[in-house]
Amino acid sequence: MKRFVTLLLSGALSVPLLAQQGPVLATYTVGNTTVSASALTGNLDTPWELLWGPDNFLWLTERGGTISRVNPSTGQVLPLLTITDVTETGESGLLGMAVHPNFTATPYIYVVYNYTAAGALKEKLVRYTYSSTANTLGSPLILLDNIAAVTTHSGSRLLIQPDLTLLMTTGDAQQRPEAQNAASLNGKVLRLNLDGTVPANNPTPGSLVYSLGHRNPQGLVRTPSGTIYSSEHGENVEDEVNLIEPNRNYGWPMVEGFCNTPTEQPFCTANNMREPLVAYTPTLAVAGLTYYTHPAIPEWNNSLLLVSLKAGTLTQLQLNPAGTQISSQSNLWAGTYGRLRAVCVSPQGRVYVATSNRDGRGNPAATDDRILVLENRAYIPSSVKNGRASALQLWPNPATQTVAVRLPAATRTATTVHLHDALGRAVRTSPLPAGRQEAQLSLTGLPSGFYLVQTQLDDTRYTQRLVVE
């Protein structure tokens, strides 16, 4: 019987970690690397957010109000919830999402969406609680609401930082002066505690405003070094990629793009203006933004990956070592798959891109909307090449209350230790900061049985079996 349980455990956990390996739609040459594109799943309806979750599944929002998990091996879409008060009209609907970093102990999902109140379109931020046993989301808690909205210019991406504060982008809701109004929540990057309160160390005491002067920011990402970037729609010119800093002004509507006209320069000088890293004229309708650094596609190390709607581009933006400038950029494609809204990266170095061809502005094919997978199929992680999984040390094993986890070397970047049960569910996590080699996992409250401990060190994934008594 023990042998059967062990096989079940191994199989359940291997599924979401394997490449989907569907038929290749196209290949792209990136330096010395061949990147293959395939379709993970199709027949979606206007995907908006795409995240790699702590359970090794993709988490997806669709603009009509549906939140789902997607198996990255099989492409199976597992709906969790359809939010009934989402108003999908024009560009409005269910937008950005974030997952609590300590998901096992605190299984919270945060989403932002448009809704109707007293006949007016609004925007709100809501927290849901995930049940892994029922595969559902419930217990909604409104953290922030009554933000002015119209059918365009709502933003909105969410990002949880290591200090457990949440960044939320908002559009100007076609009320251009509100982007410069510090008392308004529109046209801003907001910073909240995870209970919706104002962090004590925000730039202005009592205010959620982190930065202002934004038109319609639709991409948001943080690098391991702590640098934050956003992508933002321009009006008719000057789409922007910005480095987000607290208490900075990003100019809209007084400045579009760089401070390069006589009327813009005095405003920039007087208002702590932060110019974009790059701007695009004509506009691309820039959308999702992520950060890439992985040996699977080494040519993309220390790069931002940006997708766009109108131009349908996937653009690599190479950062300088400090992350303060874009040293070069290139498109992997332009228009091949139509409109592109969201992008994320898995721990295995695969890039996932969601199309947005059913948003009323595209020309959907029979298979749209889709999630595409970009991967180097020739890449073999060193954990496989060298058979080093056994280098992950656990003690005691069997264990009862806690287990110590030791990697073969100190981490260069922050990582997380995951404990999975026999059904493949993540039941415990523990952060492992950069420069550390050991972590502790609490086993309190876990039933006896077989578990797997998993973590990542550079390009090596380590897995070790644990017996809980």
Image (cartoon, helix red, strand yellow):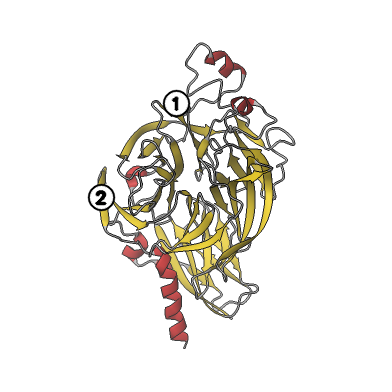
**Location of residue 373 in the rendering, given as x and y in whole percent from the top left corner:** 35, 53
**Residue pushed farthest front?**
119
Residue 213, image x and y in percent? Answer: 58, 28
Q: What is the count of numbered marks?
A: 2
Q: Quick one: SS at disc 2?
A: strand
SS at circle 1: loop
Residue 72: image location, x then y, percent:
41, 61
Q: Nearer the viewer, residue 45 or 187?
A: 45
Q: Position of residue 183 (x, y in %)?
A: 70, 30
* Type of amino acid under label 1: Glu
Reading the image, the residue beneath label 1 is 238
The image quadrant of residue 174 is top right
Q: Residue furthest bottom?
A: 1
User: Quick one: which residue is furthest to the top in this view?
Assistant: 262
- Amino acid at pointer 2: Ala
Above/below status of 50 relative to 418: above
Q: Is residue 401 placed above or below 406 in the rendered structure?
A: below
* Residue that sits furthest to the right in the current view: 206
Q: Is residue 414 above or below residue 271?
A: below
Which disc is residue 160 wearing?
none
Which residue is labeled 2 in the image?
Answer: 26
Question: In this view of the protein, can residue 33 be seen by the observer?
Answer: no
Residue density around tag 1, few if under 14, some if 14–19, many if 20 or more, within 10 Å: many
Residue drawn at the location 65% of the way across and 72% of the way down = 444
Nearer to us in this view, 279 or 378: 279
Position of 262 relative to 428 (above/below): above
